Amino acid sequence: MSRSRYFTVREAEAVLPDVEKAIRAALELKRFYVEAENVLHEEASRIQMSGGAMVNSARLAAEKSRRDTCASQLRTAIERIHSYGCEVKDLDIGLIDFRTVYRGQEVYLCWKLGEQGITWWHGLEDGFRGRKPIDEDFLANHSA
C-alpha cells in the first residue's frame, strides 16, 4: 500500500474524478468476485448433498479461475486508489479518506461514492459517524 499523503480540500477534489473512477471499477470487481464465490459455495453444497456425484469439474475450474482473477484485479484496483495518496475505508459503500491537518491535528477529509464533492471531515478515530461539515473555519485552518 502506498503511503498516505496530506491534502488540502482543493488537492483532494483535484484527484477525486480519478479516485471515483477507480473505486467504481473496484466495486464492480468485488461484485464479480462475490458472484463467483457464491457459485462455488452453491456447487460445494450441491456436491456435498449428492455425495460427490455429478461434479462438473470444468465449471468449477472456470469459477475458481474467475474468482481468483477478480481477487487479483481487485487488489490491483485498491492499490491504484491508494497510489493517489488516499485511503479506502469501506469498499462496500465507496468510502474514501484523505489525510489533512486541521488546527495542528491530523484529520481526514471524507468522501463517499455518490457525493458531489468533498464536504465532510472527521478525526482519525471518529470515523464516518463522526463526520462534520467543512465550513469556512475548517477551510481557513487546514493544510496539506
Image (cartoon, rainbow, N blue to C red):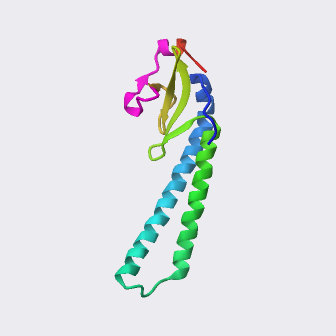
Question: Residue 116: image x %, image y %?
Answer: 50, 32
Q: Which residue is drawn at 51% across and 55% down?
A: 30
Up-down relation of residue 88 to residue 64 (above or below): above
Determine the image quadrant of residue 2: top right
Seen in the picture, residue 18 relative to 30 is either above or below; the reply is: above
The single residue placed furthest to the bottom in the displayed view is 53
Q: Picture coordinates of residue 101 (x, y %)?
A: 55, 20
Q: Quadrant of the C terminus?
A: top right
Could you tell me which residue is drawn at 51 percent across and 76 percent down? Answer: 60
Residue at the far left in the pictured view: 49
Q: In which quarter of the image is the N terminus?
A: top right
User: Residue 119: where, in percent of width, then height?
Assistant: 48, 25
Magenta highlight on residue 117: no
Looking at the rendering, the stretch of residues picked out in magenta corresponds to 123-138
Looking at the image, residue 132 lies above or below residue 23: above
> In the picture provided, is 5 more to the left or to the right than 112?
right
Which one is in front, 123 or 38? 123
Task: Name which residue lies at 60% across and 33% down.
Answer: 4
Residue 140 spot, x, y in % from top left: 54, 11
In the rendered picture of this protein, how many numbered marks are placed on residues?
A: 0
The reply to whether the magenta stretch includes residue 128 is: yes
Residue sitting at 57 percent across and 50 percent down?
25
